[in-house]
Amino acid sequence: MQLPDEQLRAGHIPADLYRQIPPGTDVRKVVIVQQAPRSYKGPIVLTLVIATASVIVLLVIAFVAKIVAASAVAVLSATGGLSYTINRASKNRGLPRAPVRARSVQSKHRRFK
């Protein structure tokens, strides 16, 4: 029993608390009230709520910025001030290419002689 908490749980009264008890008090009827240990549940939940809220705010800002940009482009293109095209065609959708034949090792050596 090295720690004061262990002493209190075992029923021992530390000397500094024993000096504060008024004379003539029955020590067997003394109740020592300890402060409850700190709970970290509140700060952790608060941190998670703040992080989630900030992510949601950033997503809303990005969505609004996308809508504002699209409407600005639509207005400017309708008034003739700007033309904007979106090309969604894939680069791989062109005509199929003929397969390239690999040259043999002998043909490479003949070429460099």
Image: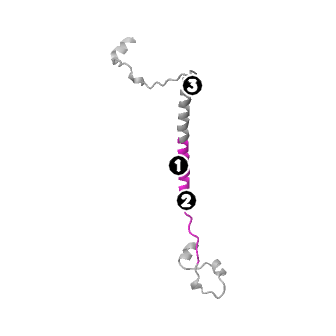
* Residue 64 vs residue 94, the one in the foreground: 64
Q: Position of residue 71 (x, y in %)?
A: 54, 31
What's the CA distance linking mark 1 and mark 3?
36 Å
- The reply to whether the magenta stretch includes residue 53 is yes
Mark identifier at residue 52:
1
Indicate the amino acid at tag 3.
Leu
The image shows residue 100 at horizontal and vertical percentages of 35, 18
- Mark 2: amino acid: Gly
Q: Dot 2 lies on which element?
A: helix
For the residue labelled by badge 1, is the local secondary structure a helix, a strand or a loop? helix
Please tell me which residue is depicted at 56% across the width and 67% down the height of the picture.
Answer: 37
- Please tell me which of labels 2 and 3 falls first in the chain: 2
Which residue in the protein does label 2 denote?
42
Vertical placement of 73 versus 49: above or below? above
The segment highlighted magenta reads: 32-59
**Is the magenta region chiefly helix, strand or loop?**
helix
Residue 2: quadrant of the picture:
bottom right
Horizontal side of 74 relative to 20 (left or right) equals: left
Query: Compared to 72, does 102 lie above or below?
Result: above
40 displayed left or right of 111:
right
Q: Residues within 10 Å of mark 1 (few under 14, many from 20)?
A: few
Mark positioned earlier in the residue sequence (1 or 3)? 1
The residue shown at (57%, 64%) is 38
Judging by the rendered image, the residue that carries numbered circle 3 is 76
Horizontally, is 92 left or right of 64 in the view?
Answer: left
